[in-house]
Image (cartoon, rainbow, N blue to C red):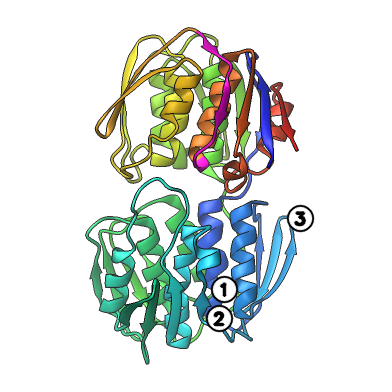
């Protein structure tokens, strides 16, 4: 099992290009099930979660041509013959549940294992199932699987109890082929939702209101193929900016709109960083110790839960004390014990963590527990005096494309140990 070794104490400096967004690519890849026409996607990141998704599609009968070095994927779902997402794949990646909407909408049936993924909380799929039921699907649970059937989905009003990203995506894809108009209320507003809607429009879907709380979908009998380029990964961009802030460096990330990161950038500015916003780039300059600031995670446009762990690593070396409150997932402080092994002073109080910043962290052997925790430990290791070795970094490969190589280009002393 691979590990990552870091010799800390160096400020990272330079420019990097952001990869395509994992969280946008996954539902867009799965939306290829909505059509029997060939599809082509560009800017697809090279990640383990992408490989798992392509394997799932292949098992269903989708023809897949993956060109990872060119970041392109060709798909043809004309020959789909299996409507099941098995436990062996779904347990590795929760996003697999997003096959439910497309399969029921196009084929009238789906059998999908109850999901797994990062152990950061329950994240029930009840929002997905209740929405599909309102569109006319009959849902049953059997031996750890969700069984969904419908002769033809019908447009309906769906009001989400919580603005769940996954439930919004699943319902949006299903509604694109439902008969009549659907009105989706209390939708998630994340940029990845907008990207999915734009890709569905490239297939001929009629959608209005994406990026707002209410989305209108006029269902169509059939959709054409996808020809689309995935948006940049705002969480990857935020992670490298956080690393620059923590190490008192200067980094420019290219290929991302600052509008997608505004809550994060505003918080970084409060810590004393200087931010320069371009049309498709962001530069962070930090030449002094960050100032401690509180943060509360919220659905977009609030501070993203996917940046909470990285921000905590920054606060571990900041001047003062900060309170970090996690409102999205109830078990997303699994990185705290490992950051503490680096000398961070962090105490958990319910759904909040009190972080008392230290001027210096100390290297130690540590272990990653989930995707974003991995990124926070990388940042901690960059700040720590001595040599830090991080194990179980397969979590990192689920969401960051060759992170150690990009950090090395920025001057970090980091390598992957096979």
What whole-number distance in Å separates the C-alpha atoms at marks 2 and 1?
6 Å
Q: Which residue does the image show at 29% across and 84% down from the upper left? A: 136
Mark 3 Cα-neighbour bin, 10 Å: few <14, some 14–19, many ≥20:
few
Contact? badges 3 and 2 (CB < 8 Å): no
Location of residue 392 (image quadrant): top right
Q: Earlier in the sequence, mark 3 or mark 2?
A: 2
Residue extending furthest toward the bottom? 151
Res 117 visible: yes
What whole-number distance in Å separates the C-alpha atoms at marks 3 and 2?
24 Å
Mark 2 Cα-neighbour bin, 10 Å: few <14, some 14–19, many ≥20:
many
- Image coordinates for residue 156, horizontal then vertical, percent: 26, 78
Q: Which residue does the image show at 45% across and 64% down from the upper left? A: 197
Q: Which mark is residue 70?
A: 3
- Image coordinates for residue 417, horizontal then vertical, percent: 74, 33
Q: Which residue is denoted by mark 1 in the rendering?
A: 32
Contact? badges 2 and 1 (CB < 8 Å): yes
Instruction: Examine the structure image and report whether residue 362 is included in the region drawn in magenta.
Output: yes
């Amino acid at each position: 099992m691979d590990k990552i070794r870091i010799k800390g104490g160096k400020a990272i400096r330079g420019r990097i290009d952001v990869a395509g967004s994992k969280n946008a690519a996954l539902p867009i890849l799965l939306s290829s099930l909505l059509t029997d026409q060939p599809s082509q996607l560009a800017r697809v990141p090279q990640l383990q979660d992408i490989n798992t998704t392509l394997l799932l599609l292949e098992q269903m009968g989708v023809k897949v041509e993956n060109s990872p070095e060119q970041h392109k994927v060709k798909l043809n779902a004309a020959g789909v013959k299996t409507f099941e997402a098995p436990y062996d794949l779904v347990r590795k990646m929760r996003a697999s549940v997003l096959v439910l909407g497309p399969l029921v909408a196009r084929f009238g049936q789906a059998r999908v294992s109850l999901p797994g993924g990062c152990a950061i909380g329950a994240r029930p799929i009840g929002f997905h199932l209740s929405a599909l039921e309102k569109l006319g699907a009959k849902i049953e649970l059997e031996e750890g699987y969700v069984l969904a059937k419908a002769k033809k989905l019908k447009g309906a009003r769906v009001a989400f109890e919580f603005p769940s990203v996954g439930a919004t995506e699943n319902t949006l894809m299903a509604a694109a082929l439902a008969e009549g108009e659907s009105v989706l209320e209390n939708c998630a507003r994340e940029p990845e939702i907008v990207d999915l809607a734009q890709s569905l429009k490239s297939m001929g879907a009629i959608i209005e209101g994406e990026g707002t709380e209410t989305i209108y979908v006029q269902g169509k009998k059939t959709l054409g193929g996808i020809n689309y380029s995935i948006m940049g990964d705002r969480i990857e961009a935020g992670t490298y900016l956080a690393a620059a802030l923590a190490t008192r460096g200067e980094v420019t990330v290219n290929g991302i709109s600052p509008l997608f990161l505004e809550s994060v950038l505003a918080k970084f500015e409060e810590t004393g960083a200087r931010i320069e916003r371009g049309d498709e780039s962001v530069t962070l300059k930090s030449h002094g110790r960050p100032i401690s600031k509180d943060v509360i995670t919220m659905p977009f446009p609030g501070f993203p839960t996917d940046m909470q762990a990285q921000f905590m690593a920054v606060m571990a070396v900041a001047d003062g004390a900060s309170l970090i409150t996690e409102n999205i997932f109830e078990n997303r402080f699994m990185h705290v014990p490992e950051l503490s092994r680096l000398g961070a002073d962090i105490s958990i109080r319910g759904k909040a963590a009190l972080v008392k910043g230290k001027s210096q962290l100390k290297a130690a052997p540590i272990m990653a527990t989930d995707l974003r925790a991995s990124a926070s430990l990388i940042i901690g290791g960059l700040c720590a005096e001595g040599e830090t070795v991080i194990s179980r970094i397969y979590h990192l490969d689920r969401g960051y494309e060759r992170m150690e190589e990009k950090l090395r280009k920025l001057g970090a002393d980091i390598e992957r140990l096979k």
